[in-house]
Amino acid sequence: MEGYAFEFAQAQLTALPSGALWWHGRQCLIVSDLHLGKSERIARRGGSLLPPYETTDTLTRLDHDIMTTGARIVVCLGDTFDDMDSEQALSEEHRTWIERLMAGRRWVWIAGNHDPAPLELGGTHLDAFYEPPLIFRHIATGSARGEVSGHYHPKARVALQGRSLSRPCFLRDEMRLILPAYGTYTGGLRSSDAALTTMMEPRATAILTGTPMVEIPMPRGAAPTAPQRPSLAQPR
């Protein structure tokens, strides 16, 4: 499988180019911050009119990741919808699509700060999901080793093949793993932002999404240079 394999809290995980996380040992796919319906929410509140295709694009990528991995468990780490009205505005086509993806799988919705829980879609609704040795929640607390979360939409800038590139990224240290936002219209918070530099340990790293996938020291200032021949599977 294409991706970047690593060990975290004694769990063997794979960061996928899409921004999803695959836990083969539990047949579990984890995604965060889909923010479905963002264009509808912006238009509803009088903002700019964006092409309303992000829900289709996000669900297409999620469908691909589920089918490729054969996931039996899917965990959504909160902010699946841009707000609770976005869930109500979901088209019948998209609602049926999500229900098809949920069929025959254990589906866990973690409450986010944008959407407490998409209650009409079934599944299990939790503030945190414990699957030892990992703990899944929306916002990192750092209270226990093995915490997997989202919320911050981290991105990192790296000098790669003579160019400076900014990509969504996974951030990890010994205590926590923060996933990038999975949604098409989601923005990002630079890893050099104080909210992340003060939270992540000094030896934290960033795993950049896209192709090629590389792991670098978490950028806290100027863009670092990526390895000349990045590995797609480099456990620590």
Image: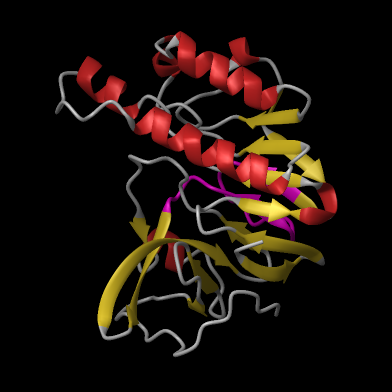
Which residue shows up at 33% across the image and 39% down it?
A: 185
Rendered location of residue 12, percent (x, y) = 77, 64
Q: Nearer the viewer, residue 41 or 93?
A: 93
The quadrant of the rendering that contains the C terminus is: bottom right
Is residue 89 found left or right of 2 in the rendered image?
Answer: left
Location of residue 8 (image quadrant): bottom right
Query: Residue 141 magenta-drawn?
Result: yes
Q: Which residues are magenta?
A: 135-153
Residue 39 is covered by the magenta coloring: no
Which residue occupies the foreground of this view, 138 or 199? 138
Query: Which secondary structure type mostly characterizes the magenta part of the structure?
Result: loop
User: Residue 117: which quarter of the image?
Assistant: top right
Give above or below for 48 relative to 215. Answer: above
- Decide if residue 81 is on the left or right side of residue 3: left
Q: Which quadrant is home to the N terminus?
A: bottom right
Residue 177 or residue 20, whichever sits in front = 20
Q: Residue at x 55, y 23 (%)?
A: 116
Q: Position of residue 66 (x, y in %)?
A: 65, 40
Residue 190 placed where, x, y %?
34, 62
Q: Residue at x 62, y 70 (%)?
A: 173
